Image (cartoon, rainbow, N blue to C red):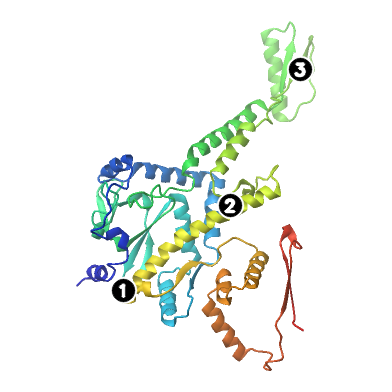
Amino acid sequence: MGILQTVREKVRGLFPAAQAPGTTEVGYRPTPEDQVKYLYRQLWVDPDLRQAILDIREMDRADGRVRRIHARVARDAIKGGLVFTQPQGNDKLKTEWNEFRRRLQLDRVEKLKSHARGLVMEGNLPLQIVVGEGMKVMDIVRMPSETILPKVSTNGRFTDVRQAYAQFDILTGAETAQFALWQMIHVRFDPDNFDDMGSLGRPFLDASRETWKKLRMTEQDLVIRRRMRAPLRMAHVLEGASPDDLNTYRAQVEKDQAEGVTTDYYLNKKGGITAVQGDAALGEIGDVVHLLDTFFAGSPLPKGLMGYIDGMARDILEDLKRDYYEEVDLLQDTLSWGYEQAFRLQLLINGINPDDEEFTVSFAERRTETPNQTVDRSLKLKALGLPQGMIWEELGKNADDVEKRRNWEAKNYDPYPDPGGIKTPRVSITPGNAQKGESATSIGNGG
């Protein structure tokens, strides 16, 4: 029995919703327009998604603001890396995760950021599961999303889970590879219909492409206008001068100007020099400001966090930041689901039913907060009576690892061997007593 057949037998229940036959479901999941689109997809890739991805990539290369948006969102999403949490410690499961993370290089910030950035830019993250001879998941490879298509019928379900996805060659239109459902973890961001297996995700800036083109065009027109109409011009009038006299005067003036700045002119005929002022309305850029506001209104990142803070109140910026952090949390949940599915696949291959185990794979820092805000939130949760293990999980730490480290240090580095030699620290929180209205935390020795 080959590797693919062996894995197929072991992961038969990994995606029950996608392959459960004999249910009472009737009707069609896709819209009528999508049903027609799925017929055309049998011949070539989705042209709309491909064009959107190409436009987003061009925007990312040409505009530093777009590049900064993608980089900032991806950086905030993977902040702290992946963390494996369990309500109850299971050393075997923890060992499996540590080996899995090292093999797949999920402890590398570069790989996590590449995946997060791809999901933000393309709206889809096709991750190919690579299984080696030792029946271990050896790698999880990001594939170009514009070449991957789900093979679904007009009812929005996979026609065959053994050939759920296909990769197309853009140049020839031929299929270069086929993937079983377990071989391809397709992470979709904001699909039109989640239950429709053929509904693909959309890039973050998909709906802002047209606004960005108008913004770039207006900014280029602004530069051309300033270059052509801003310089000061001089009108030289020589009354009664013949064409030869005028040409001689012009040649002499242009010669003097070429050698340096000329401030004096000498005329032997009646005339004068009049200054022609440049465009006095160059400072009116309301159209540029409007397009800039429109572009950032469709962006996950608030304009104020990109340096455009003119006239923006701090309270408004704080509200926009909270909304942005919610977007980052959603992106983290979407991305970490793919890694958790890959780990569940590894457990199934090893003969462990993941449904019998309680664990979560998530990113360490759920919110982009200052250290002071994080500590304040944790102390307040502790005051509400939450278990200590949940507090550590809120801090992005594995509670089991923290407890083991605490016990080990107590045995080896405890400066107070006498149990009565140290008392519980005294923690006090003063709301609004720190910078930007944050709570001030004071920790003192117990006594």
Name which of mark 1 and mark 2 comes first in the sequence: 2
Q: Amino acid at mark 2?
A: Asp
Residue where numbered disc 3 is placed: 274
Residue 184 is situated, as x and y percent measured from the top left of the image, at: 33, 60
Nearer to us of marks 2 and 3 is: 2
Label 2: element kind: helix
Q: Identify the residue at horizontal 27%, vertical 56% (top origin).
A: 164
Measure the alpha-carbon separation of dots 1 and 2.
40 Å
Location of residue 438 (image quadrant): bottom right
Name which of mark 2 and mark 3 comes first in the sequence: 3
Between 315 and 72, the one lying in front of the other is 315
Label 1: element kind: helix
Q: Amino acid at mark 3?
A: Thr
Q: Identify the residue at horizontal 49%, vertical 76% (top origin).
A: 87
Residue 214 is situated, as x and y percent measured from the top left of the image, at: 53, 34
Give above or below for 218 relative to 357.
Answer: above
Locate residue 389 relative to residue 171 in the image: left or right.
right
The residue carrying pointer 1 sits among few (fewer than 14), some (14 to 19) or many (20 or more) residues within 10 Å by Cα, namely: many
Residue 134 is situated, as x and y percent measured from the top left of the image, at: 30, 76
Residue where numbered disc 2 is placed: 323
Measure the alpha-carbon separation of dots 2 and 3.
57 Å
Give above or below for 362 relative to 296.
Answer: below
Residue 370 is situated, as x and y percent measured from the top left of the image, at: 65, 63
